[in-house]
Image (spheres, coloured by chain):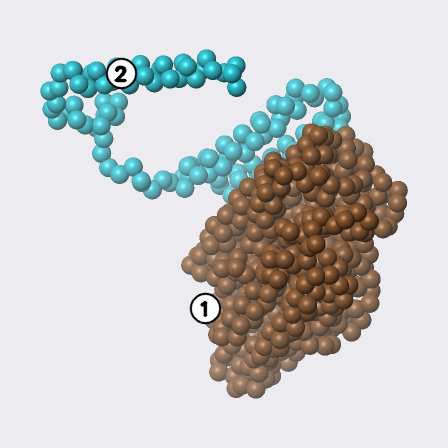
Chain colours: A cyan, B brown
Amino acid sequence: MIDHIAILIIFIFASILGATVVALSVFFGPKNPNRWKKTVYESGSEPFGDSRLKLDIKFYMIAISFIMFDVEAVFLIPWAVVAKKYGLYGFAVAFVFITILAIGLVYEWGRGGLEWD
Amino acid sequence: MGNPAFDILSILPFAVACSFGMLILLLEVFQRQTASRSYLAGIAVVGFLLTAFVSGSFLPTGTARATFGGMAWIDGYTQIFTSLFCLAGALTAMIAPRYLQEHGADRGEFYALLLFSVAGMIMMVAAADLVVFFVALEIMSIAVYALAAYTRRSKLSSEAGFKYFVLGAFASAILLYGIALVYGATGTTNLAAIGQAFGGDVARGATGDAAAMSTLAQNAIVAAARGADVSVAAVIGNTGAGAVPLAILGATLILIAFSFKIAAVPFHMWAPDAYTGAPTPVVGFMAAAVKAAGVAALFRVVSVALFSDSFRGGEYGWVQIFFALALLSMVVGNLVALVQGNIKRMLAYSSVAHAGYMLVAFTAVGFRGGDISMGSGLVFYLFAYTIATIGAFGVLSWLGSRGMPCDNFEDLDGVGYRYPWIGLAMSIFMLSAAGIPPAAGFIGKFLVFKSAVAASAAGGPGSGLLIFLVVTGILVSVAGVYYYLRVIVHLYMKKATREVPEMPYGAARWAIVICAVLTLALGVLPGKLVNSSEQAVGQMAGRADGVYQQSAEAPLPTPGGIRLIR
């Protein structure tokens, strides 16, 4: 525990420093608010509408496809690192894994999951 | 790494089921939308039969082996339940096509999902590690959520699917939390190693094959050494003070998650709505196979990981939990089923009551005088229950048509005369569910109650409570006869109020006939299945039998019995 005491000190020091600077500007800084200064900062574009809008189901399909390839990468990259060590057995297992994913992709394609319209 | 050849052989049933599922998906995609999909049901049935065949023939029978480095067990217990799940899946696939055509949902995904969920069930019963178990549970559950919402244009079906999904997701989260806490207390997720850590002595395996058992014990020890810091295991072995509350909390959360899955009171709230809204063939599958998978896996977890003396009936035993769950499920399930006007809802509450009867067997096994062999009645009960339930829902889905579902008791009026064979089959299923000989349900109930009485006769504190449980069970099942016979009254003693349409499709009829014949056959000639059940439970890998005998020499951890309830 005692090894990390320096980090705690930095945390405390940073908090005090940050709080002090903000407090100084709140108490002593000049204030002339107008309408534009009070709006929410949205990178310069005007904020409008509700953020809870209905999203097209197509985005969901894209997310699903993304997860499929994501999981593929998560499993294949560690296998690729040790591919030589596991030899033919490892290759066969990886091949079966890719085949299953490919069938999923073919299914999605055939069902029209990859078409935008 | 273990033996790669055996590893691949051991997951062959799982692989066959998954392959047929994927095959059906591909066939479904490369076909005109308008073409009939009924032939896919035939492929699914072939897939199920092949899965059962592979499990029974290609794997060594009579021995128990760990596979994939101690991640799953291939033993008689896995095999007998594989055949049960395949039977349930095949019967559902035979019942479904006509119903799906009738409701405009004739798509091949149904059969693929059925196969995937059965694959998950197989892995769930085989699991020797809580993580594998969790993954298998999700494979099964996600497929069944989709099945429950399968007729997606029907509001009721969507509601059923959504309710089932939300409650199921909660149960999964609770299960994961329980697994995490147990891992925190013992340092391992391997069931046998958890059993050792909880019990504080080496897991003694089945009485069967000594060589197989020694490899199993080795596997367990290796897993414990690999997964767990040995010193941690040793500390917990003495039921070290700090870890015990953690372990109890974790085990309790796991039991709660299971109670959700098998719909035991007070965790049954989702069942009536989900069963009423979901497509009728799916309800049969959910009520029978999913519940059977939950009960079978729970029995494995209980008898491997949680069977030490201190954990089953001591100061903080789960036997109290099972006692309460069994009592509440039997009483609430039966009494609420009495007043239902909707047959699917009535059968939902009846399935809650059946969960209660099954939990009586758990209570008997966990009792101080009980042992794991007493669970063999449970296996038989699950077979009898599964077949009769799928048959009963099969009759309902066969009789219903689009816009004219067969949901209420009145819809059955006079069907016994219009369709004599279907009426007879439905009567057999109801008699089996009520536990009246010569149907199979009678033998199942008899075996379960017998195990409780035997455990009580072995003595120990609180044995009177076990008798109390049995007497309550018998009384409420007599009350249950009322609503089962009500179905038969409507079949035969009421005038038909509506025209039941002509039924064109034949496979569903065959499935119903198979269910009826099997129900009668198991009721009249139960011997073979009773023997196989006993063998299966006897060969269950890693079961922590003999802990009781062992600690009889040393003083027991606590004077035990059912302390909380007493």
Q: Secondary structure at mark 2?
A: helix
Above or below B185: residue B499: below
Q: Position of residue A11 (x, y in %)?
A: 40, 17
Residue at figure coordinates x 36%, y 14% from the top left: A13
Q: Amino acid at mark 2?
A: Thr
Gap between marks 1 and 2, in whole Å?
Answer: 72 Å
Q: Is residue B146 visible?
A: no
Circle 2 sits on which residue? A20
Residue at figure coordinates x 46%, y 53% from the top left: B162
Residues behind callouts 1 and 2 on a single chain: no
10 Å crowding of disc 1: few (<14), some (14-19), many (20+): few
- Residue B353: image quadrant is bottom right
Locate the N terminus of chain B by quadrant.
top right
Q: Position of residue B149 (x, y in %)?
A: 49, 54
Q: Amino acid at mark 1?
A: Gly
Classify residue B532 as left or right of residue B185: right
Locate the C terminus of chain B by quadrant.
bottom right
Residue at figure coordinates x 19%, y 19% from the top left: A26
Q: Secondary structure at mark 1?
A: loop
Classify residue B199 as left or right of residue B155: right
Q: Nearer the viewer, residue B459 or B532?
A: B459
Classify residue B20 as left or right of residue B554: left
Q: Position of residue B373 (x, y in %)?
A: 78, 57
Q: Is residue B245 visible?
A: yes
Classify residue B346 as left or right of residue B449: left
Label 1 resides on the chain identified as B
Q: Position of residue B498 (x, y in %)?
A: 48, 80
**In this view, the mark in front (1 or 2):** 2
Circle 1 sits on which residue? B403
